[in-house]
Image (tube, rainbow, N blue to C red):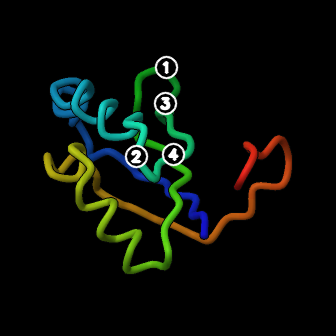
């Protein structure tokens, strides 16, 4: 099952994001990662203000476990995290 996940950064936490960015990118891009797509959400000035991820998980409990391993989550970057089941219909990667 796929989930669309949006995460909003805490106010003034750009330094936290930048400090943990490399670790987060390794976590998300690892070949065994359940993250199927990810990227920053941008504010009006073009700075990152959150994240958008598409994650494959068996269920919501599995998704919670995956999200807890994100270096950004471990660094308490996010003020809000929201998810909803997602069906990739247009230009879906093969096998999803």
Question: In whole angstroms, how far apart are the C-alphas of marks 2 and 4?
Answer: 19 Å
Characterize the local packing of mark 3: few (<14), some (14-19) or many (20 or more) Cα atoms within 10 angstroms.
few
Q: Picture coordinates of residue 12 (x, y %)?
A: 22, 35
Give the residue furthest to the right: 90
Q: Which residue is mark 4?
A: 52
Q: Answer with mark 2 or mark 4, whichever residue precedes in sequence.
A: 2
- Asked whether residue 49 appears in the rendered view, the answer is no
Query: Mark 1 or mark 4, which is nearer the start of the sequence?
Result: 1
Q: Is residue 94 visible?
A: yes
Residue 43, disc: 3
- Using the image, determine if residue 50 lies above or below residue 26: below
Q: 8 or 44: which is nearer to us?
A: 8
Q: Earlier in the sequence, mark 4 or mark 3?
A: 3
Q: Nearer the viewer, mark 2 or mark 4?
A: 2
**Disc 2 or disc 1, which is closer to the eye?**
2
Q: Is residue 95 left or right of 19 when viewed as pictured?
A: right
């Amino acid at each position: 099952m796929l989930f669309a996940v949006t995460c909003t950064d805490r106010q003034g936490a750009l330094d936290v994001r930048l400090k943990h960015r490399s670790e987060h990118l390794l976590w998300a891009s690892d070949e065994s990662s359940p993250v199927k797509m990810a990227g920053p959400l941008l504010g009006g000035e073009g700075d990152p203000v959150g994240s958008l991820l598409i994650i494959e998980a068996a269920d919501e409990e599995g998704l919670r476990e995956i999200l807890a391993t994100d270096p950004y989550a471990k660094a308490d970057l996010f003020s809000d995290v929201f998810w909803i089941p997602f069906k990739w219909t247009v230009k879906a990667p093969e096998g999803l």
